[in-house]
Image (cartoon, coloured by chain):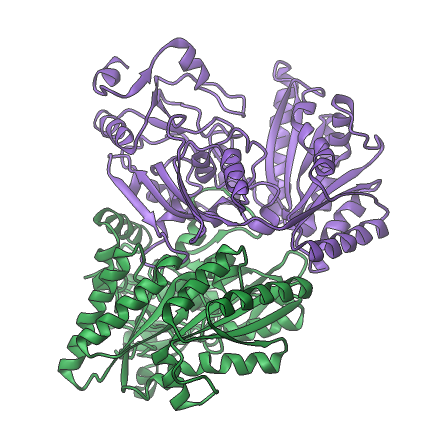
Chain colours: A green, B purple
């Protein structure tokens, strides 16, 4: 990579071993060292890097904070990492037109706090919101608990400035709330996992901060009842802002790791939040509590920040708690139609019993989005292989129920081999042709999404 | 077209002169006779048509109800019309998963009523909702008054079954509320104006019907004050479900045509609706009324269906009323950032005074989306030419203010020559390459969007 450094005077770049180690992984646990790490400061820096990479056929992988779950930012094929840590300015908060312009390295949680302080709201809230970047969120079309009411990142992206693989700068989308001139490239780039262009500036829609929030925790001693509660709440014409789920394995893991007082024999917990006008949400919360109680649940309710944080403590403790069960997890991210959640969870329990592999489930029940954690020890080759076999069975069942194999984590490297289970040959062919339109030399994040 | 008929036994097809006249126009006023009209009953019929057209290089134009404003469904280049009048089944209303599956010929208003009756809500409400079809709405990414709160058609499209130009059937998207496997072809097809594939089935997200609606009419005798009201309402953290605007020319045309009792010297009218929990919206409506009164407006408020219909009467009467001014209108559909609406309207008034051509403005002020009606007589060549010159000036000013030349009507035929004012060469080049990926033979709705 000496050639790379010489050609890019004035841009921060490193091939130091400690940098190559630090920028070669994400939350999937997969690690591959990059050829070099570059930290652009400006769009012009990105242009410089891409022009050079394009001319020399050097693969480039854009990277936010490396919190991805599918190795989307892991630099396979000898790629150079473009790390956006230094492009982290909130360029503009336009309170009259309700939008905000960010550089890709802005941390989601930081944006949330800046906006809240001014009375505004950016709904997408991935679990990693205190670390993950807006650029990564847009690349993956990230979701989060609030997606049930407010949608996912895609629903907030208005305009993207990006650098194409050949170094051309393109601004797609509109500064306005509507716009239908030509094909929708902006939403094609959203969720394209860094394979079509490198984002350098992003305009996002924002909302007024809801005036009030109420949080409920409903503890069920019957799995079916919790699933019924989810469908009944929605059928009662209430759309809460979160409708989160934890199964008994998740509850017991949390209680062992960081007890928050959940009954250890509980079969399922729902964590439900309503937001909006305080008068309206109090009524909604009461209705939800009634529905859950009728299905046998015990209810805790919180109306202030402190009590709310207590209720969320268990949900937030899940990820670290899981490592108490096994040293590794195969973390999947399936979605089924909302009324198939109980059926899916029952199948998962059966699969776990049949194979002897523990499966811990939690996620966004209101969206039908279940994070399936297959607990294994990677050192135990036999167990790991059984775990991977299980993944395929989980995907088969998901697709049989009308679902998708990825709700918010993307395909990246880890799911590339499975996309043919969900997408038709024709779709994959069209997607690959679109990839060629943007990136004929296949230098931008190669090896991701497509199985080869 | 004899060849066409012989090759498609069992499919309803016509080359009768009266059909060729009836299916060759849309609301733009442009008329070109198709080579034939085909009425498919099933996806298989569409496959049959497209395979035949593909083999023989025959251009095909899918058509909903022909209510488009930019000649998107006008069959130029000797095209055959594929009319979806017979594919109008609501296939499924899934009340548990909150979505509905439609054939493309379903009328938007019919879907609205079917859903309301069951307590559900499909927000996109184009002015032509009692005639226009869901297929056309998705092809154009249609908007409507409620877009300010609920977004446009794109925000509701989950899954599209469509037939590609070569006759292959492709189902893109998901049955679930989330899904991030591969590029987002579903939202690329949305708004592609019938140039990439022919829709045969569409799954749309639906919402619970809001429990209450309040409607306000605010009459201003000062244009700036009405613009200030729009920004102040939004800045006060209220997002109404409609925030519609009519200027003095529109008011006076309506009062001459179908008097509803608006003061003829009014400079602007805002028609504002809030929906949701009845307790919450009453408070919101009071706050909005206060804001408007402080800016000098007179307020009428309606809380029931009858009174609401009275308030909407003026807004609904605009389109027919315009023809009282001049026999023809050049109907544009610009969007500027919300806080630029007054500036844009002032420029439009100046342009009208300079040229002596009357311009009537109304539209979705809350979105910054103004329907600019340039009133001319097409028989008066000089006046018509001046009208067309004016269009370009309107677009220049729109783009200078950070806007877009089409908010919800699409590009079609009438705006194709202007897209270079808004899109970069690179964007157009990428869009044309995407068109080639789907339609290498350029048989699907040729001559639209791109200027050649």
Furthest residue in direction left, as rendered: A382
The number of numbered badges drawn on the structure is: 0
Furthest residue in direction top, as rendered: B17
- Residue A418 lies left or right of residue B383; in this view the side is left
Q: Is residue B211 visible?
A: yes
- Residue drawn at 35 percent across, 58 percent down: A196
- Residue B7 lies left or right of residue B350; in this view the side is left
Who is closer to the viewer here, A20 or B258? B258
- Horizontal and vertical percent position of residue B391: 61, 32
Who is closer to the viewer here, B263 or A211? A211
Q: Is residue A158 visible?
A: no
Q: Which quadrant of the structure image shows residue A38? A: bottom left
Query: Is B43 located above or below residue A373 in the figure?
Result: above
Query: Is B382 located above or below residue A382 in the figure?
Result: above
- Residue A332 lies left or right of residue A295; in this view the side is left
Image quarter of the C terminus of chain B? top left
- Residue drawn at 67 percent across, 51 percent down: B240
- Horizontal and vertical percent position of residue A269: 44, 75
- Horizontal and vertical percent position of residue B430: 37, 47
- Horizontal and vertical percent position of residue A100: 58, 63
Query: Is B408 located above or below residue A318 in the figure?
Result: above
Image quarter of the N terminus of chain B? top left
- Residue drawn at 56 percent across, 37 percent down: B126
Who is closer to the viewer here, B9 or B360? B9
């Amino acid at each position: 990579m000496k050639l790379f450094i010489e050609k890019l005077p004035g841009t921060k770049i490193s091939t130091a071993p400690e940098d190559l180690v630090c920028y070669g992984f994400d939350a999937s646990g997969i690690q591959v060292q990059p050829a070099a790490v570059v930290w652009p400061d400006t769009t012009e820096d990105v242009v410089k890097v891409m022009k050079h990479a394009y001319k020399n056929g050097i693969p480039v992988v854009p990277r936010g904070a490396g919190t991805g779950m599918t190795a989307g930012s892991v630099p396979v094929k000898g790629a150079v990492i473009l790390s956006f840590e230094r492009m982290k300015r909130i360029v503009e908060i336009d309170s009259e037109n309700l939008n905000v312009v960010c550089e890709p390295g802005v941390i989601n949680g930081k944006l949330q706090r800046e906006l809240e302080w001014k009375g505004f709201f950016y709904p997408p809230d991935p679990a990693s919101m205190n670390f993950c970047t807006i650029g990564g969120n847009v690349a993956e079309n990230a979701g989060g608990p609030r997606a049930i009411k407010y949608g996912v990142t895609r629903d907030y992206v208005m305009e993207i400035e990006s650098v194409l693989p050949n170094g051309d700068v393109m601004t797609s989308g509109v500064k306005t709330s509507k716009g239908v001139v030509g094909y929708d490239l902006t939403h094609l780039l959203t969720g394209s996992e860094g394979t079509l262009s490198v984002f350098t500036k992003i305009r996002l829609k924002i909302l007024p901060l809801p005036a009030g929030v109420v949080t409920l925790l409903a503890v069920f001693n019957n799995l079916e009842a919790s699933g019924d509660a989810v469908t009944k709440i929605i059928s009662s014409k209430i759309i809460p802002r979160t409708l989160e789920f934890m199964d008994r394995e998740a509850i017991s893991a949390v209680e062992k790791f960081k007890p928050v007082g959940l009954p250890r024999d509980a079969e399922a917990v729902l964590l439900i939040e309503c937001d909006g006008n305080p008068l309206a949400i109090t009524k909604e919360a009461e209705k939800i509590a009634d529905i859950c109680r009728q299905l046998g649940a015990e209810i805790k309710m919180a109306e202030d920040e402190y009590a709310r944080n207590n209720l969320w403590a268990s949900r937030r403790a899940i990820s670290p708690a899981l490592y108490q069960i096994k040293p590794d997890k195969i973390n999947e991210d399936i979605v089924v139609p909302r009324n198939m959640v109980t059926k899916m969870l029952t199948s998962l329990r059966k699969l776990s019993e049949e194979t002897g592999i523990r499966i811990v489930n939690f996620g966004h029940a209101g969206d039908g989005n279940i994070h399936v954690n297959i607990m294994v020890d990677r050192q135990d080759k036999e167990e790991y292989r059984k775990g991977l076999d299980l993944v395929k069975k989980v995907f088969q069942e998901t697709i049989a129920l009308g679902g998708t194999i990825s709700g918010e984590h993307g395909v990246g490297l880890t799911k590339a081999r499975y996309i043919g289970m969900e997408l038709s040959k024709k779709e994959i062919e069209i997607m690959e042709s679109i990839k060629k339109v943007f990136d004929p030399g296949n230098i931008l994040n190669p090896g991701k999404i497509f199985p080869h």
